[in-house]
Amino acid sequence: MPLKTDTSLKYTFDLQALEYYFEICKSLPNELLTHMNKGRLFSIMKNANKNMEDLKKCIASTMKSQRHWGEDVPITWTKLESALKRLKEDKKIYLFSDLLRDVKNSNDFNINDEEKLNNALEFFHETGVILFSSETENIILDVQWFVDAFKCIILDKEHKDSKDEKNLPEFQELYENGLLSKSLLNQLWEKGNFNQHKKSLIYHMKQLDMLAELSLSTEEWYVPCMNKHAYSHEILKNCNVSSRLCFLFQFLPFAVYHRLVVACINKLDMELWEREGRKCVFHTVTILHYKDSKHRMLIGICDNKGRINTEYPYSIEIQANVTYPHEVDTQLTSDLRIRICKILYNLTRAFSSGESSFSVGYRCQLEPFGGNLESQIVKEEKLSGLEFVCSKCTTNHVANVESIRRFWEVIIVKCLPVVPCLHITLQMYLEYMYC
């Protein structure tokens, strides 16, 4: 049997890498294939220098193509960045007021007011140098330290030293439902010098939609990426429900769903709904309720790749519900659509350089989320007239368009002379909000 030469081995490895690359391409939607490039494919071997120089050149070239590369910034900002890195050697967090005092007292920075300092710090925040928000005094200088604090919450290997027979129930709540108690967080952050900066760390984790604060009084948080609990549609038994509004994606990281849930809790004055003494939060479904309201909102994420409609293989779907005999308030659901659109637009605006990265549609059947009836997604612009004949379901059926769309029709009244109310599409709304 002839021995393989280095050349034949190289050919074999390169061929395997190419086959693997094409397998990845097959699983991606067309929208993402524009980001793929066979010229950036490299087969490398452990403890070998094969292709390493070409790989380094490719990484450098890719970095130079990034948005902030080559951007003109004041020369004083580079001096400020160096100063922030020196501060990081001794401190994890620094106060904005102290930094403003420091730069005013120095002749190096030419920064003499809050606005100029804010602009510089926002740039460093966007480029990953620091974590900064103009709404808080604390600047997190060490981003890796912040990441390590979150890893203490979500990684099993970080839990082995903290776990014991006394806190086992609290760990179970975290592992199964993503619910984090004050006492457990204190234990997890005991060793990493995190507890003394707990307030700032929690603030920035909330700002980044990594967790949501469920109770200020008891200090309890929801960490959605930890939730593994399964949903059952029996939860909505004896409820009147709206139709299901679907936000349709070609590409949807699971984290977008997590961040949407957290944003609704943090920004829309919502709470996790409790039923039979348990919070209704599951791996792919969350049920929230408006404070001081009988209305609840279900948020679910669906993988539609196995269904007939493959144009949009993923969807985030929302459905309002109330306990029978109450009826769903369509004004509330209309307002909810606007708020959810705005949050999703902000969460996914980096996905696409053009229009919105998602479309809108409806399920063709009016039933509780996860129910027994087969249903398909119909895009909003195709759901017109009085009736819609759905031929995507196994059994053809006729859907009443008004009964589906009435919950989510959006009417915006512009405060300008003699401008009528407008029934708007998603794109019209986004242009109204952001253009």
Image (spheres, helix red, strand yellow):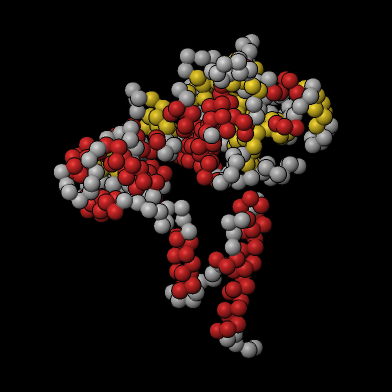
Residue at the extreme front of the image, as rendered: 417
Q: State the residue at coordinates (57%, 79%).
A: 10
Residue at the extreme top of the image, as rendered: 325
Q: Is residue 171 above or below residue 251?
A: above
- The total number of labels drawn is 0
Residue at the extreme right of the image, as rendered: 396
The percent coordinates of residue 183 (x first, y second) are 32, 33
Q: Quadrant of the C terminus?
A: top right
Q: In the drawing, does residue 338 fall left or right of residue 27?
A: left
Nearer the observer, 215 or 242: 242
Nearer the observer, 16 or 69: 69
Q: Quadrant of the N terminus?
A: bottom right
Whether residue 327 is visible to the viewer of this picture, yes or no, is yes
The percent coordinates of residue 267 (x first, y second) are 45, 27
Residue at the extreme left of the image, as rendered: 105
Q: State the residue at coordinates (37%, 32%).
A: 181
Q: Is residue 48 above or below residue 223?
A: below
Nearer the observer, 128 or 13: 128
Q: State the residue at coordinates (62%, 41%).
A: 249
Whether residue 315 is visible to the viewer of this picture, yes or no, is no
Quarter of the image where one finds residue 326 = top right
Nearer the observer, 82 or 291: 82
The percent coordinates of residue 179 (x first, y second) are 43, 33
Q: State the residue at coordinates (31%, 51%).
A: 74
